Image (cartoon, rainbow, N blue to C red):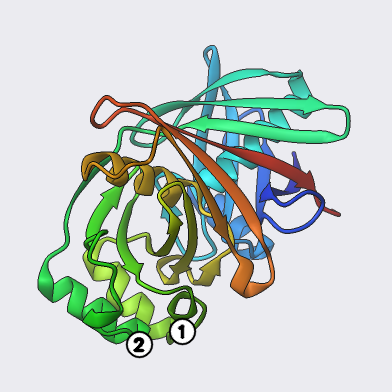
Amino acid sequence: MTLQKIAAFSDGNTGGNPAGVLIADALPPAADMQRIAAEVGFSETAFAAPAGDGWRVRYFSPESEVPFCGHATIALGAALALRHGNGVFALTLNQAGITVEGAYEGDTLSAALQSPPTHSAPAEDALVDEALAVFGYARDDLDPRLPPARIHGGADHLLLALKHREALAAMHYALDAGRRFMNPHGLVTVLIAWAESPQHFHTRNPFASGGVYEDPATGAATAALAGYLRDIGWPHGGHIDVVQGEDMGMRSLLAADILSAPGSSIRVYGTARLMAE
């Protein structure tokens, strides 16, 4: 078993969200996967083993298992392309079946995932008020065009959309307070977003539930955001681009294609770069 380190949704040869990828003949015991993920220290490590015509995959953060992780799936797609050649790989997750397409062309690694089904619902006022207190925002900071919502694209997130880019840059919170907020509400991350235009978003993703202050690129949350935009009738034109990680010095680029069918899978894609072992 060789663990690879791959940054997903990179901006050329920089940025992206580092993920661990371990491909083995059989998945290690859950306790070992949790230990390895904690030792790696990235926000997620993906573990994959052959299963029928595809791969059985589980994802672990340093503190917990998560049902789906977009950036680790992109990293896995890149690793599978390096190992088996370009192609579409079927993945069986804990709660869904998806695919990832990996490609290695010249010096460029890329991957595209098809998310689990998406859904969203308005967030309860009490939940929103609690979140605003944790992250230092007020109701007046919120963009009324994009109401707070519980959003899902393989994992559960809370969306808070802001009126101004400066408010996004100013995001701060205490990790313990974020953990105490997210875990009881079953939130994997909080997605804080600013719409530069209908198709261009800037986002930040506190990930206290996994023991990580902030993710520089979050494919699962991007899929959930895209599904939410479809649900509310946002003029997305079938595609959005997302810049994430800029405020933490790890600029990452994510893209998502949105089909019209309610709840249908979102295609999330980007490039990847190999990191030093």
Assign a secondary structure to mark 1: loop
Q: Which residue is mark 1?
A: 172
How far apart marks 2 and 1 lie (CA) works out to 7 Å
Q: Is residue 2 above or below residue 180?
A: above
Q: Residue 31: image x %, image y %?
A: 51, 54
**Residue 161 shows in the view:** yes
| Location of residue 186 by image quarter | bottom left
Considering the image in quadrants, where does the N terminus appear? top right
Side of 37 where 90 appears, left or right: left
Q: Is residue 97 above or below residue 28?
A: above
Q: Residue 66: image x %, image y %?
A: 42, 51
Residue name at image x 33 percent, y 65 percent:
161
Residue name at image x 78 percent, y 57 percent:
14
Q: Nearer the viewer, residue 169 or 248?
A: 169
Residue name at image x 31 percent, y 28 percent:
264
Q: Nearer the viewer, residue 150 or 176?
A: 150
Checking the image for residue 136, the label placed there is: 2
Q: Tag 2: Cα neighbours inside 10 Å, few (<14), some, or many (≥20)?
A: few
Assign a secondary structure to mark 2: loop
Q: Residue 58: image x %, image y %?
A: 49, 41
Side of 5 where 128 appears, left or right: left
- Which residue is the extreme one toward the left? 125
Q: How many marks?
A: 2
Q: Is residue 32 above or below residue 203?
A: above
Q: Nearer the viewer, residue 44 or 145?
A: 145
Residue name at image x 78 percent, y 46 percent:
273
